[in-house]
């Protein structure tokens, strides 16, 4: 079983970036029976915790059982766990000239 943990968003001011949306989580889970996704609850995430739950994702503060952690590039250093693979994403909006 592969367990992906999504680190809670803590950036102030909050923005609209997430590592995976609830729809993306739902799709990933539907494509792989050996996958589970755990999301840390976040009061400032652009998606509500309940949206992740409806997508079949477990909510938990504890991500220690996850093999991979996903987050946004401003993740707090203390949210990264020693011995875990952490992938911190950064998005830039496409601009037109």
Image (spheres, grey):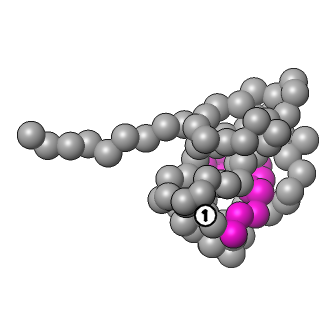
**Which of the pair 15/23 is nearer the observer?**
15
Looking at the image, which residue is at 61% across and 63% down?
45
Q: x, y percentage for residue 7?
A: 72, 48
Quarter of the image where one finds residue 74: top right
Q: x, y percentage for residue 92?
A: 37, 40
Q: How many marks?
A: 1
Q: Is residue 33 visible?
A: no
**Which of the pair 75/31 is nearer the observer?**
75
**Above or below: residue 21 compared with residue 65:** below
Which corner quadrant holds the C terminus?
top left
**Which of the pair 82/57 is nearer the observer?**
82
9 left or right of 34 in image: left
User: Outermost residue toward the front?
Assistant: 12
**Above or below: residue 89 compared with residue 22:** above
User: Outermost residue toward the left?
Assistant: 97
- Report the residue marked by disc 1: 45
Looking at the image, which residue is at 85% across and 34% down?
81
Looking at the image, which residue is at 55% across and 60% down?
14
42 left or right of 84 in image: left
Q: Residues within 10 Å of mark 1 (few under 14, many from 20)?
A: some
Quarter of the image where one finds residue 68: top right
**Above or below: residue 89 compared with residue 23:** above
Looking at the image, which residue is at 26% across and 42% down?
94
**Above or below: residue 1 compared with residue 37:** above
Which corner quadrant holds the N terminus?
top right
* Highlighted magenta segment, given as a residue range: 28-43
Residue 34 lies within the magenta run: yes
Q: x, y percentage for residue 61?
A: 86, 56
Mark 1, secondary structure of its residue: loop
Q: Is residue 87 visible?
A: yes
Q: x, y percentage for residue 52?
A: 66, 66
């Amino acid at each position: 079983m592969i367990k992906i943990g999504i680190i809670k968003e803590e950036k102030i001011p909050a923005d609209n970036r997430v590592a995976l949306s609830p729809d993306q989580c739902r799709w990933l889970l539907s494509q792989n029976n050996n996958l589970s996704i755990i999301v840390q609850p976040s009061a400032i995430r652009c998606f509500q915790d309940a949206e992740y739950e409806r997508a079949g994702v477990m909510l938990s503060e504890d991500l220690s059982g996850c093999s991979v952690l996903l987050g946004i590039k401003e993740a707090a250093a203390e949210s990264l766990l020693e011995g875990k693979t952490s992938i911190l994403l950064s998005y830039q909006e496409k601009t037109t000239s």
